[in-house]
Image (tube, rainbow, N blue to C red):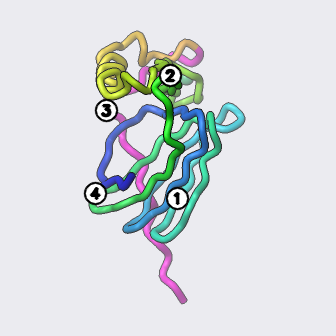
Amino acid sequence: MVIHGPNARRDFHVDPSDEIFYMLRGDMVLEYIEGGRRHEQVIREGEIMLMPALTPHAPHRPAGTWGLVIEVKRGPDQTEALQWFCERCDTLLHEVTMHVADIEKQLKSAIEQFDASVDLRTCRRCGHLQPNKPPVPQPPPKEHAR
Ligand SMILES: [Fe+2]
């Protein structure tokens, strides 16, 4: 599928198969969790990144960008998960597992439920309260070519 920025989602997606991100226009930031820590990878226009299956990831696309995402076609019985991580210590705050068949309606309500709940947004490890509309990481400007 081809996806147009901007997006403002702060949840992470856990997909049962690999995903390929290819930037057609503009640059994006892909956050992902590996080894219990949050990492940020900038994907520049024309670059490709493979996100391995079951790696929690959150794509951030500024306005005016276009990206191609290639995924394996999934069956209705497969599940995918949304996860939220503490912005201070990367502890898992909340997780919702959805069947692919119901994903369109479950996705929106899962995000609304998390944003509306101070309890879900409060980290049990460090006590940080996640804002319900935290800032979205932006790709840094490109360095000038020499
Ligand atoms: Fe925390």
Name the mark nearer the viewer: 1 or 2.
2
Identify residue for label 2.
77
Is 53 contained in the magenta span?
no
Compared across the picture, whether 9 is left or right of 82 comes to left
Q: Please give the range of residues in magenta.
A: 125-146
**Which badge, 2 or 3, is on the more N-terminal residue?**
2
Q: Is residue 144 magenta?
A: yes
The structure residue drawn at horizontal position 58% and vertical position 29%, both measured from the top left corner, is: 90
Q: Report helix, strand or loop for mark 2.
A: loop
Q: CA distance from mark 1 to mark 2?
A: 33 Å
Query: Can you tell which mark lies on residue 117?
Result: none
* Disc 2 packing (10 Å; few <14; some 14–19; many ≥20): few
Q: Main secondary structure of the magenta part?
A: loop
Tell me the residue that label 1 is attached to. Answer: 42
Query: Which label is found at residue 133?
Result: 3
Residue 37, above or below 101: below
- Spot occupied by residue 85 in the image (x, y as percentages of width and height): 52, 27
Q: Is residue 58 visible?
A: yes
